[in-house]
Image: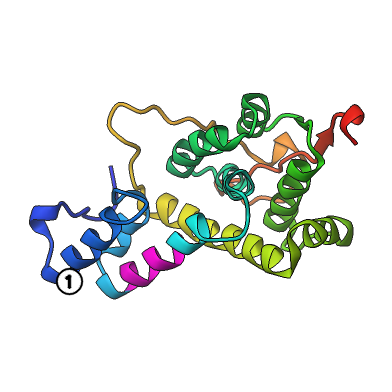
Amino acid sequence: MARIPLFSPDSMTPEQERVYRAVVDGPRGTVVGPLRAALHRPELADRWQRFGEILRFGTSLPAWATELAIVVTARRWNSQLEWHVHAQAAASAGISEAALESIRCGGDVRFDDQQQADIYEFARQLQQGGNVEEGVYQRVMNRWGTVGVVELGAVIGYYTLVSMTLNLHDIPLPEGVRAPLEVLGAQHGADAAQAPGEPSLPVLKPAQVTQTQL
């Protein structure tokens, strides 16, 4: 159950309804996730939905790259709804079910494609260390250019905000959907200092690439 009231169309103010209509008439087609919380401040929700729309649907990056970066973010923050929505989108965009399942479970992640491994590593390193090593950064830059590397960083940052909002306010999964993520702790990848009772975050494993594809 959400920690805050969630609006339905018949309970919205005119300003909330204006933003709601902008979302459902756009590429999302529905109001889900963090926008349900942001509607408490319509101006915030409006800017949020426009920012999110360009980052998910309007960048120069291929859909598989955007969705892979998003699922890494969802896994890092144990964000159930974000994973539920974007794992399906990542699979449809070309990320293998085996890779997605390994990310979901915190296991060894293998790719047949170096470009997919680079996107995964870019997102993984940025989430876990707050930066990306030079080799990975340059490979992404060389493939997608300055615009692409800037967009990728923005996608990861934006969906971190999404994850935190979903978790903070307990925005629910759709009715009848079971939580897809086990809440993994740091013990799945590395030891980490942790205060008693403090939730821990998974440490995702580095990508491995099938050697014949290098």
Q: Is residue 3 magenta?
A: no
Say how many tags the image has.
1
In terms of depth relative to the viewer, which is nearer, 200 or 173?
A: 173
Vertical relation: 83 (above or below) 53:
above
Q: Main secondary structure of the magenta part?
A: helix
In terms of depth relative to the viewer, which is nearer, 163 or 187?
A: 163
Image quadrant holding the C terminus, namely top right
Residue type marked 1: Glu
Q: Position of residue 14 (x, y in %)?
A: 12, 69
Q: Position of residue 147 (x, y in %)?
A: 68, 68
Residue 190 appears in which quarter of the rendering? top right
Q: Position of residue 38 (x, y in %)?
A: 32, 63
Q: Position of residue 6 (x, y in %)?
A: 22, 53
In terms of depth relative to the viewer, which is nearer, 204 or 85?
A: 85
Name which residue lies at 37% across and 52% down. Answer: 27
Image quadrant holding the N terminus, namely top left
Name which residue lies at 29% across and 75% down. Answer: 43
Helix, strand or loop under label 1: helix
What is the magenta range? 44-52
Color theme of the render:
rainbow
Dot 1: few (<14), some (14–19), or many (≥20) neighbours within 10 Å? few
- Residue wearing tag 1: 15
Q: Decide if residue 56 is on the left or right side of residue 43.
A: right
Name which residue lies at 78% across and 48% down. Answer: 118
**Farthest left residue in view:** 10
Name which residue lies at 61% across and 34% down. Answer: 94
Vertical relation: 96 (above or below) 55:
above
